[in-house]
Image: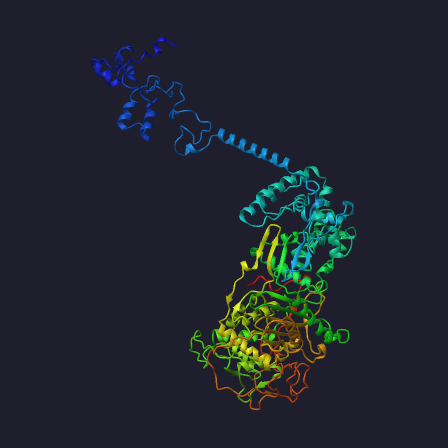
Amino acid sequence: MSEHRRKPPQPQGGGRAAARRGQPQADPSAGRRDAPRDAAGSYSDSYGAGGEESPYGSRADARRATQRGTGGSRRRAADGAGHGGAGGGGGRRGGPQGPDGSGRGRGRAPEPGKKRIIDYPRAGRYGAARWVPSWKLTTGLFIGFTGSLVAAAGVGYALVGIPDIGKTAKAQNNVYYWADGTEMVATGGEANRQIIDYADIPKEMRWAVMSAENKTFETDSGVDPVGIARAFVNMAKGGQTQGGSTITQQYVKNAMLEDQSQTVSRKLRELFVSIKVGAKVPKEAIMAGYLNSAYYGRNAYGLQAAAQAYFDKDAKDLNPSECALLAAVLKGATYYDPAGSPSIDPVQATQEKNRARAEERWRWILDEEVKDGRLDAATRGKYTEFPEPESPRSNAALGGQVGYLVDLVNSYLVNNSDKTGITETKLRRGGYQIHTTFNKKKVDALEDAVKKVQKDNIKPKLRPKTDKYVQFGGASVDPDTGAIVAIYGGVDATKHFTDNADQTGAQVGSTFKPFVLAAAMSWGVRNPDGDPTQAQDERTVISPKSLYSGKNKLKIKDFDGNDWVDDKGKEWLQTNDGQQSYNAPSYQIDLREAMRESVNSAYVQLGMDVGLDKVKDSVLRAGIKESSLASSRFPSFSLGTSSPSAIRMAGSYATFAASGKQRDPYSVEKVTNSEGTVFRHDSIAKTEEAFTAKVADNVTDVLKTVVEKGTGTNAQLKGREVAGKTGTTDGNKSAWFVGYTPQLSTAIGMYRLDDDETKKNREFLEMYGTGGEETIHGASFPSQIWQDYMETALKGQKAEPFPVPEEIGTVINEAPAPTPTPSATESATESPSPTPSATLPSPTPSVTETCRKFDFSCNNNGGTDNGGTDNGGTDNGGTDNGGTDSGGTDGGVTTSPTPTVTTGTSRGNGNGGLFGTSG
């Protein structure tokens, strides 16, 4: 650098102002350039001269410091900016040099203190820029994170081993105990499973599984990253993890049965095992292991056991169609076994819905095999009919009633898993000691009572047209606790798979009438004068002494007192059994006697006066499941067009026996395992007041009349008070007796239904002539079974009386009428009822017929004495001139729609069962 460009050394002084003060004034005319370069008063010399050294490298730095408030007052900052630091060379011409003269200081504050390893938030940056990481920091963090993951994955991969599929599916026993603590049965540990070699697995089965579940099985690494990510996301949301997506992952999942928890750690472990298995285990071994360990339902683990359970053949003999069905079942046996699994899910796992799902997936799998080139179109064309599997079979230990009891318990535990903590998977793995509520002596007594009636009266070989397909169901409940002490589910749990105690589909008839009476005494009826201006919430609670019409073909009024009409404007004319009218010409009958004689017209009108919504509420309060109820839009709802199970009917009458205290029926007292108590019923038990004691005890008092001198006299017990009600449905398709003592409530149902449970849309059959009887009523075989069972069940227990009821309600209508006498014909002065021209005759016996076998009070002269006859034979009777929904057909005696039953071949419940999803 030339000499004349070099800056002279800076003088020490007080800055430019001080220099000016210390020098004589120059001649203005000389101008600035007249001063020599080395003069002490030059402007250049004044920068940084004198006073403290400025902490800023330039005026820009000083200005920023002023803005940040770190330089003191604005004046002080300006003064500091006017001094050039000794090493700064700043000033107006100082350029971009920093404090150290390096030229790197423009726009930045000096970095105070020691330099940080991670510069974040970034020093020397201001505002949002401080929080934007540098590319160096971002790159370093990414490399560090990735390295950590790789290291962790390596450790995880090294620590896991390859599972031994031969040690999987080792279920433990579940041991079931009677109520007295003695062992009932041990089941579950016998896990039906046989290992077969890869060579014995049909190639069609391998093809079906690959086309359905993992098309790339033969070439993939064994894991599906997308499926794994989806599982983690669902787990984070608290939903289902949806399982592994590849056959390898499913194989690993089956091999890790000891830990089926839905946790992140388990999923990670399963992932590492799947990766190792995919890398080190041959595909043939993975496929064989998967098919040998998978669960196909019906207690069948592995392909060989499944082939036997579904098609009664060895796996090697399966055809492509059968293989496709078994591959479909692998998606979930509960919902794809064509037989259904109503004991697990009574709503979605019915036989009808399961079969539809299974057929759809079976067809899709065969089509996919063709698309994938594994099955030729010609072979596919041979299989257009769905392969019909065998009915499920249980082991011998579950024969008789035991299988029904075990299924009932399993349903209770699984369908209440949110309370019991026991899922279907956990129950299948076993290891539980399950203490039930069942009393062995009572179970045996109920079965013996049914068998006695079957042996003495039901002769299917002698009378195949009338006695074939006759079925019974029954249940017995303790009113004090709700414990189910006995059930009768069918002839044998290994032959008849539907539990008739827990589901039937059979209408219950007049056994619904007590709920109508309870509603009338709880909420009251509309204004008895029928004043249309009267507010609906102004009701009259009535007494059982209140009078209603016993007239046959009674024109039914709605709640407001108007003629009830259906959607088409048609009236409803309610008929009684045998077309009988009571107490002509007034036709008045009190509610106690109407219950005793099972007079339909009186209770249908009572139901309308109360309001069918209140009748329904009464039914639900008593403990009936809403899923089992028919439509409450029609007057016949009060006559029992619904189809609750025997368990629920026994439980609802137990509510009356317990003076209005409702306790849900249950079958498990407690469950334990090796770790201690898993569940106790008393931890969830609760009691609801369904009705006041006054209401419930008055219902009981009325039902006592039915047994003492009405349609239920066959149910009398020596030395004990009994309350109960008979029920018979239209078309004579079902008959019931439900009754109770203070200690025990029992329901018995009887009906005819084709026992071939593989058939679709089975219908209930008429019982005219069944058992040698012209008609079947609740007063016949059902009440006989009830009486035989209860005599034995209560043997040794002290007889207890029912509570004496308090007076309740107001007697409405007129003064009491005399004892009712059935009239064989309508009064000559009776106004004709508007009925359609095509009137169908009522299929009931003449009142002058010879007395029936069980009609002990019949006097054989066309009338009734105090014993009465069972007039509940046509409980759904009525002439609905429009519609068939629980109402009737045009032009005749009301007939409910023919009940269609789509029960599955698995024992369990359906609508109306004990453990349905509603209620």
Colour approach in the figure: rainbow
Residue 344 vs 570, above or below: the answer is above
Q: Which image quarter: residue 553?
A: bottom right
Residue 862 vs 368, above or below: the answer is below
Give x and y (percent) for residue 20.
23, 16
Camera-side residue of 143 and 651: 651
Q: Which image quarter: residue 215?
A: top right
Q: Quadrant of the N terminus?
A: top left
Give x and y (percent) for residue 438.
63, 64
Residue located 32% across and 25% down the image: 62
Residue 860 lies left or right of residue 573; in this view the side is right
Residue 161 lies left or right of residue 519; in this view the side is right
Residue 12 vs 168, above or below: the answer is above
Total number of numbered labels?
Answer: 0
Visible in this render: residue 31? yes
Residue 33 lies left or right of residue 553; in this view the side is left
